[in-house]
Amino acid sequence: MELQTILTGLLVLTLAPGCGAVERVFFIAAVEREWNYAPTGKNIINPQDQGAADKYLVNGRNRIGSVYTKTIYRSYTDATYRTEIPSPSWLGLYGPIIRGEIGDTITVHFRNNGSREFSMHPHGLFYKKDSESAIYMDGTSGHFKYDDIVMPGSDVTLTWQVHPDDAPGQDDPACIPYVYHSHVDTPPDTNTGLIGVISVCKPGTLDAKGQRKDVDEEYFIVAKVFDENANWITSRNLQKCGDPTECQRLLDNEDEDFMESNLMYTFNGYVFAQLPDLLACSGDKVAWHVIGMGNEIDIHSIEFHGQIVQTEQTSDDNIQVFPAVFKTGMMTVGSPGHWIIGCMVTDHYAGGMNAYFIVEDCGAQTSQKLPGNTRNYYLAIEEEEWNYGPSGMDKYNGGMLSEPGSKAEPYFAQTTARIGGRYRKARFQEYGDIVFLTRKSSHDTSLGILGPVLRAESGDDVRIVIKNKGSRPFSFTGHGLTYTQGAGEMTGHSALSTLAPFMCTISTYLMTLLAQMTRTAS
């Protein structure tokens, strides 16, 4: 049978006449690179809180800073491994995208140009034991083990198949994500940087160059806290400290502040909104592949401000992942602006796990929203004393909340060293109109300290008037609603990023509940 070969620069497609399946060939090497998690050194998303970023980014006597030596996967044109094929800038430190359709064969020629043994193990693809590339006691020997550990300077060829069992189902998006990574000692291997992404697609999704033809943009977001204390090359990275001996001492003593300074809360290897070129036009169809990698702290809820993603037959503004969980969200891009993508785990966001999604008005006609009503809500931000245990009783274990020796005592006993169970809080309180004189009472005591429920139907405009009676600036943002940004705004919020304190400032937010934000029936 005559075969036709197409050289694309990234891969070789070998097509059999009359068959849709192809062989996709990649040349990938593990290479050492200097990686800067924050090239500008700035907290781009919150410049007023630069100090929070500096503890991770600034090099000093007892700090490494934002630049680390990493070992990462990179793609090449051929087996000489001399001509590197650039990856998209937004992919960051991760290895090249390996795409395939159901029935395809993926052939990877892997060379280890690192300084220690590594491997290249896939998720979501079918392989035999001689292409698993993972070392463990599996009862095999001889040539079945050659791929498990690839020594520095050595090569291995891996053959993987795109099997229907691991491919998108009838109701899934056209492509779904997986990863590949080194599997010699997975935690330090991946913290050193050896992770790449895989896209498994339905037949007919990819063009002759292996690129998707069914969407305007496709992005992979890998949420991972890189633990640079567990990088195989940590000893060399410690030499970047102003006083390497001091940094080695802090590491040996597991100094909490030093260890934390070496945790990088990243999207694709970037922190504090440094991830470049997440771009789209209003109305574009964008596929978002969100991937979790790491350990027990890598539980992430990724929010897309002002946008809607449809994932797992549900519409929402966020996607949740944890280690080795791979999800796809489909988006029809909304209003122009600089929109935050961020992890809603507070410590992760504060540590820099955020980015900008930049949407432009490219002149395309966007879909019209359904007709609906305008619903007005008037909310005041007010301060009050809040008691977390108003009855004083432990209704679960019995006894008083402040009873000496009880489980509740550390939280509710008021002493010279303890506040107790009462705190000054700020909360949303609903009023009847813009005069803000008459409170609207709620009979739903289950809401507790929460603000009122804001209800709307598909197509409705939701007009929210906020009066800040608090003692500091606050703001308002709504999940599950779409909105526009003010001129020059880059916060992801719909109006002012903060509300002025003391002066009872009033701000108005106009948001819309689109049809795709309602839950999809199963």
Image (spheres, rainbow, N blue to C red):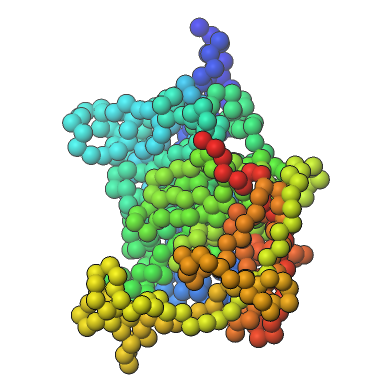
Quadrant in which residue 420 is drawn: bottom left
Q: Residue at x 53, y 67 (%)?
A: 443
Query: At 32% across and 48% down in the image, what residue appears?
Result: 186
Q: In this view, does 448 lie above or below 173?
A: below
Residue nearer the viewer, 465 or 63: 465
State the image coordinates of residue 515 (x, y, percent, origin top left): 66, 44
Q: Can residue 357 be seen in this view?
A: no
Q: Looking at the image, which is closer to me, 268 or 29?
A: 268
Does the rendering let one see residue 419? yes
Residue 49 x/y as whole percent: 56, 75
From the top left corner, tell me how far across and down residue 489 is, in percent. Answer: 71, 65
Quadrant of the image occupied by residue 68:
bottom left
Q: Which residue lies furthest to the right in this view?
A: 363
In the rendered structure, the answer to whether residue 180 lies left or right of residue 315 reads left
Is 237 left, or right, of 480 in this rendering? Answer: left
Work out which residue is located at the far top of the displayed protein and give it.
1
Q: Which of 264 and 485 is in front in this view?
A: 485
Q: Which residue is drawn at 38% across and 69% down?
A: 260
Residue shown at 23% from the left, 39% from the top = 136
Q: How many marks?
A: 0
Give the side of residue 7 with respect to residue 327, left or right: right
